[in-house]
Amino acid sequence: MFEYFYRLYDRYRLPIITMAILTDDSPTWRPDRYQINACDLSILDFQFFPKKLLDYQGQEPELLEMDNPFGTVVVAHLSALATRPDPEARYQHKFSLTRRL
């Protein structure tokens, strides 16, 4: 992320806001920075906005009503996490979301 940030900044010399979309299944893991330290000095402290897809659990009906297709993508991800141990339920969710498309 830092490399992309720097390359964009170097090319356009405009302010850049960086966001990380976290798709893991750990509700407590929420990184918000990248740091490099050397010789007891902070060489780099790159901060970014984290957004966790798990935070959208329970909002699936609202996400499916959105005009933005990203809502369907988030629902697909949440369904995949929820149905990981149940292949038949996973199939049903995939089939239902595919029909919606």
Image (cartoon, helix red, strand yellow):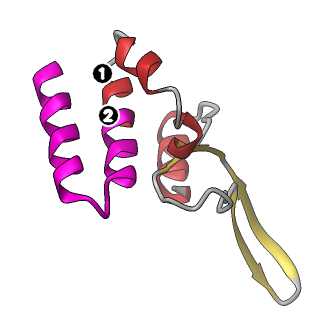
Q: Residue at x 34, y 9 (%)?
A: 67
Residue at which label 1 appears: 69
User: Which of the 4 quarters of the picture holds residue 52?
Assistant: top right
Please, what secondary structure does the residue beneath circle 2 have?
helix
Instruction: Give how far across and how far down residue 70 sits, in percent.
Output: 36, 27
Give the CA separation, mark 2 to mark 1: 7 Å
Residue at which label 2 appears: 73
Q: Above or below — where is 83 with respect to 74?
A: below
Q: Residues within 10 Å of mark 1 (few under 14, many from 20)?
A: few
| Disc 2 + disc 1, Cβ < 8 Å | yes
- Does residue 38 appear left or right of residue 79 in this picture? right
Q: Please name the amino acid that badge 1 sits on.
A: Pro
Q: Please name the amino acid that badge 2 sits on.
A: Val
- Does residue 41 appear left or right of residue 19 in this picture? right
- The quarter of the image holding the C terminus is top left
Q: Above or below — where is 50 with respect to 32?
A: above
Q: Residues within 10 Å of mark 2 (few under 14, many from 20)?
A: some
Where are the magenta residues, as a range? 75-101
Farthest bottom residue in view? 39
Q: Residue at x 22, y 49 (%)?
A: 90
- Does residue 8 appear left or right of residue 85 in this picture? right
